[in-house]
Image (tube, rainbow, N blue to C red):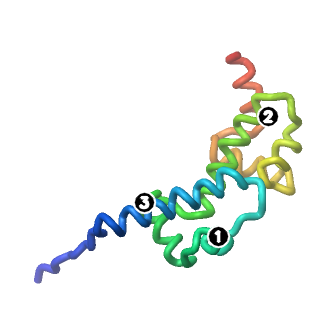
Amino acid sequence: MAVDTYMAVPRPTTLAARSELLHDARAIMEEEYADDLSLDDVAGRIATSRRQLQRVFAELAGTGFREELAAIRMDRAAELLRGPLPVGEVAHRVGYRQPAQFAKAFRAHHGTVPSEYRARVRGLS
């Protein structure tokens, strides 16, 4: 017995509204990535529900809120590691209280620890 699969395609107005929510959420995350941001906080600030914002990230970004925030933090960390700041200070500036926790997250995202990343990018300069 064949089962028909029905995928709802959002109406253009719904898609536009969701795109705007994603844009607004990302803007807050890009500006305040070092703060202790939560899904609930960001959802409240852009006047949507927690569930709706989860749906927006899943459908339009293909990721979750936490993963998106971690990616923003890791991109900023990579930028900061090109400069003279100690790794511990970079960790603090991108929202990590513990340098070891930061190093673990950085390695998971970039495939290398912060000090090796720094040495590699400085060697390319």
Image height check: is 48 above or below 72? below
- Which mark, by number, is residue 87? none
- Which mark, by number, is residue 60? 3
Return the residue found at the far bottom. Answer: 1
Q: Quick one: label 2, few (<14), some, or many (20+) residues within 10 Å? A: few
Q: Secondary structure at mark 1?
A: helix
Q: Secondary structure at mark 2?
A: helix
The image position of residue 20, as x and y in percent, is 47, 60
Left or right of 46: which side holds 11? Answer: left
Q: Secondary structure at mark 3?
A: helix
Q: CA distance from mark 1 to mark 3?
A: 19 Å
Image height check: is 69 above or below 48? above
**Tag 2: amino acid:** Ser
Instruction: Report the residue marked by disc 1.
Output: 45
Foreground: 80 or 105? 80
Please report the residue visible at 47 percent of the width from the left and 57 percent of the height from the top: 61
Q: CA distance from mark 1 to mark 2?
A: 36 Å
First in sequence: mark 1 or mark 3? 1
The image position of residue 124, as x and y in percent, is 68, 17
Please report the residue visible at 43 percent of the width from the left and 65 percent of the height from the top: 18
**Tag 1: amino acid:** Arg
